[in-house]
Image (tube, rainbow, N blue to C red):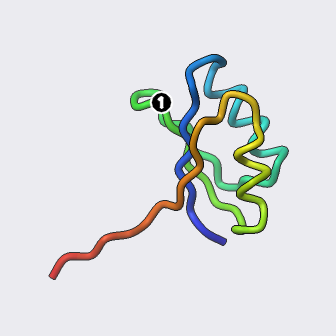
C-alpha cells in the first residue's frame, strides 16, 4: 500500500469525489477541504482507476522526506 495525494478540478464537492475514490479502492480516505485535496492509501495497481474518477486531475504518490 502506498499513500496518495489526489487533486480535483473543483467541479464537484470533495466529499462526492472521495466516495467515488473509495469505491475505486482508496482506503483510509482523508479529505482536506482547506487545501482542496484528498489523501488515502491504495496499491499502485489501482492508481489508474483512481485517475479515472470524474473530476480528478492528478493522483500522485505522497513521498516522505527526511532531514538530518
> Which quadrant of the figure contains the C terminus?
bottom left
| Side (left or right) of 23 relative to 9 | right
User: Toward which corner of the image does residue 51 lie, by quadrant?
Assistant: top right
Q: What residue is disc 1 on?
A: 36
Indicate the position of residue 45 as horizontal and vertical percent values: 77, 67
Indicate the position of residue 13 as horizontal and vertical percent values: 63, 20
| Side (left or right) of 47 relative to 49 | left
Say which of 49 and 20 sits in front: 49
The crowd level at tag 1 (other Cα within 10 Å; few <14, some 14-19, many 20+) is some
Q: Is residue 53 above or below residue 27?
A: above
Indicate the position of residue 65 as horizontal and vertical percent values: 31, 71
Disc 1 is placed on an element classified as: loop
Indicate the position of residue 39 as horizontal and vertical percent values: 55, 48
Residue furthest to the left in view is 68
x 53%, y 61%: residue: 61
> Which quadrant of the figure contains the N terminus?
bottom right
Say which of 33 and 5 sits in front: 5
x 66%, y 27%: residue: 15
x 64%, y 60%: residue: 41
x 69%, y 36%: residue: 18
Amino acid at each position: 500500500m502506498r499513500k496518495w495525494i489526489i487533486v480535483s478540478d473543483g467541479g464537484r464537492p470533495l466529499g462526492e469525489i472521495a466516495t467515488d475514490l473509495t469505491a475505486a479502492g482508496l482506503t483510509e480516505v482523508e479529505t482536506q477541504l482547506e487545501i482542496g485535496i484528498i489523501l488515502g492509501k491504495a496499491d499502485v495497481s489501482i492508481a489508474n482507476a483512481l485517475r479515472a474518477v470524474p473530476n480528478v486531475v492528478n493522483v500522485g504518490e505522497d513521498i516522505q522526506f527526511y532531514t538530518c
